Amino acid sequence: MAKSVRSYSSALTQLRRYLLDNDKRPTKVREMVLEQVCNLPQPFTADQLVKACEAERISTGTVYNTLNLLIDAQVIHATKRQRGKAATEFEVITGSANRMQLVCAKCGRTADFTDPAIARLIKTRKYYNFILRSYSLIAYGECKVCRKKTIKKLT
Ligand SMILES: [Zn+2]
């Protein structure tokens, strides 16, 4: 499944804006945690992040605090727990660029897709008193893995 991870710089801009808007201090350690978040394969678990931050001598408490902060700032979000996986997984929210995404309504798996015909159609649409800058299209359904399980149940 192709996944476009947003660059560190745009995630950093969003974090700084959030901190400023909420009268919170922009600290070097928070930015270091964010850097680790962006370097991890997506999605990632809190444990993976703690491990990555250990090398930078960042305490576990700070990692968890920053994780919550990044969720509040909408830099990352918790993905739906997948069956058979104990830990919640987190993922960097991709930027405001046009995107199309398939989401499995059963397990929460996501995959990006491109459809030039739909993209062209949206681009040429005119909306009254509105200039379209970007869009996000999410299609819900059932992934291959869940589909297989459904078929197994039926037979
Ligand atoms: Zn699924």
Image (cartoon, helix red, strand yellow):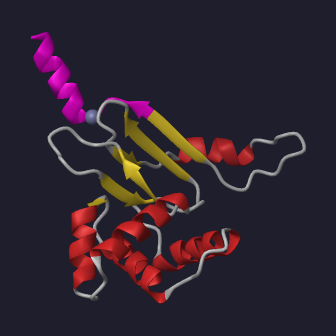
Furthest residue toward right: 129
- At a point 22% along the width and 65% down the height, the residue shown is 47
123 left or right of 71 in image: right
Q: Is residue 113 left or right of residue 16?
A: left
Magenta span includes 116: no
| Residue toward you, 149 or 37 | 37
Residue 2 seen in render:
no
Q: Is residue 6 above or below residue 153?
A: below
Give the quarter of the image for residue 56: bottom left
Q: Residue at x 16, y 18 (%)?
A: 151
- Res. 99 visible in picture: yes
Residue at x-position 31% and y-position 83%: 58
Residue 143 colored in magenta in the image: yes
Furthest toward the front, the residue is: 61
Q: Give how far across and how far down residue 153 sits, in percent.
A: 13, 15
52 to the left or right of 105:
left
Q: Main secondary structure of the magenta part?
A: helix
Residue 117 or 23: which is nearer the viewer? 23
Total labels: the figure holds 0
Q: Quadrant of the C terminus?
A: top left
In the rendered image, which quarter is residue 46 located in?
A: bottom left
User: For this view, does 101 lie left or right of residue 10?
Assistant: left
Indicate the position of residue 111 as horizontal and vertical percent values.
36, 47
The range drawn in magenta is 140-155
